[in-house]
Image (cartoon, helix red, strand yellow):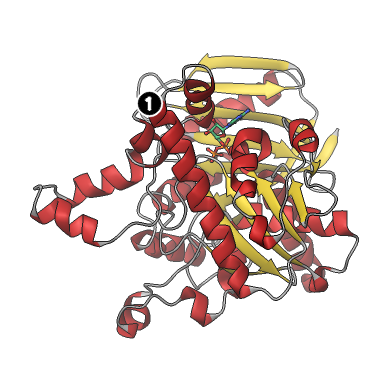
Amino acid sequence: MKKNLILVLNCGSSSLKFSLINPESGETLLSGLAERLLSEQASIKIKYQEQTVRSMLFRPFDHQCAISRLVEMLVLHELDLEIFAVGHRVVHGGENYCTPILITEDVKSIIDDLSRLAPLHNPANLTGITAAEAVFPDLPQVAVFDTAFHQSMPENAYIYAIPYSLYQDHGIRRYGFHGTSHYFVAQQATKLLSKPSNETSFISAHLGNGCSICVIKNGESIDTSMGLTPLEGVMMGTRSGDLDPGIIFHLVNQLDYSIEEVSHLLNKESGLLGVSGLSNDCREIEDAWTKNKNPRAKLALDVFCYRIAKSIASFSASLTSLDALIFTGGIGENSKLIRENIVKQLSLLNFEISIEKNEVCRFGQSGNINNDDSRNIFVIPTNEEWVIAEQTAQLLSQNKENKE
Ligand code: ADP
């Protein structure tokens, strides 16, 4: 029997991603995804060893149904896997949480209160917590926050240049996201350098559907590109990233957009999708350019890479030394075209890509992709689930030690 496994849950409003992880080795023993929850098309896909089992869910088609089906599958297939605790990815921990926390009624009400800062994410994360509590009433549940790693940012990095009272009275400040990913890749990069963590400086670029840049000094985040919400910063799959706030007034006052329509435009219809007019998926845009010479696809890729390079260069202002640039996330881990295009624009910082190494580091292969004369450029596949499992297990063993 495999014991002490952590069930990691990442809950969206109509989806639930799950994995069963050994927190020490990071091995994923089972994983899956439930989609279209709360609709009659709700379905679940569970991957165990080399097999994938797909099935439809029954009424009420909710997150609890999905977790119960996972448990049924463990029993039905007599899988020797014992779940020890549940670790939840929670998007916004505000200023309340800079480390993982054991979930209690008080913690749930704080996560609920923080929904005002993350209305698209925290309510869904809470749904996942409630569903897991119903299915596993005796297991400890831990929340690991996407914002927590960035709580080490200094004031000059997190304060917006707007009236200070908005921060004091309403918590309007920069928080940052993708914290577990930036933390993980910085730890891995530290191992590659064989240096103590408190002597390292990195800039990491998490490029997936959502994209963010982070500056990590001495193992701590000191600045990042996302802000109060994940909309700030570099261009993403469907999010605009930074733009002149005047555009919002123009859309509302001159073009009769409602605020909801502006929010939808900037979050769901912009970024790679908005500029290319084709897709939010980087692979499709790359194909549209390399195979069909679609000029809007080229423009979308150029704007994407230029904005990321500009952001990386501007973040170098917060460092006096820089050990490595790190690429991670679906695009950062796989797209040689995007990495090459970004790095070409960073020669002033002494970054130069090796075409051969850039070709090799893809599809899960980590390593450095720089020329010998260049500063280090690492490709490191992220593993947010492992961080959540590891931090959940660590918190529970600390709590146990404190009690003894
Ligand atoms: P999420 O932020 O949803 O976790 P991912 O980190 O999985 O997303 O990243 C998804 C993005 O990665 C998509 O734009 C996808 O096209 C891109 N991607 C994945 N593989 C490749 C590849 N081989 N080449 C270019 N882009 C890729």
Relative height, residue 54 to residue 295 (above, below): above
Q: Secondary structure at mark 1?
A: loop
What count of labels does the image hold?
Answer: 1
In the image, taking residue 277 as reference, residue 397 lies left or right, namely: right
Residue 320: quarter of image: bottom right
Residue 276: quarter of image: top left
> Would residue 167 be seen by someone viewing this image from the given angle?
yes
Q: Camera-side residue: 350 or 236?
A: 350
Which quadrant would the N terminus be assigned to in this image?
Answer: top right
Q: Camera-side residue: 329 or 118?
A: 329
Q: Position of residue 109 (x, y in %)?
A: 43, 63
Q: Camera-side residue: 126 or 328?
A: 328
Extreme residue in the right direction: 194
Label 1 near ligand 1 (CB < 8 Å) = no
Q: Camera-side residue: 118 or 318?
A: 318
> Would residue 137 be seen by someone viewing this image from the given angle?
no
Indicate the quadrant of ligand 1 in the picture: top right
Q: Position of residue 305 (x, y in %)?
A: 52, 45
Residue 273: quarter of image: top left
Which quadrant would the C terminus be assigned to in this image?
Answer: bottom right
Q: Position of residue 57 (x, y in %)?
A: 47, 20
Relative height, residue 269 to residue 39 (above, below): below
Q: Position of residue 307 (x, y in %)?
A: 48, 52
Q: Which residue is mark 1?
A: 278
Q: Residue at x 50, y 73 (%)?
A: 95
Give the amino acid at mark 1.
Leu
Callout 1: few (<14), some (14-19), or many (20+) C-alpha neighbours within 10 Å?
Answer: some
In the image, taking residue 67 as reference, residue 30 lies left or right, namely: right
Q: Residue at x 56, y 35 (%)?
A: 17
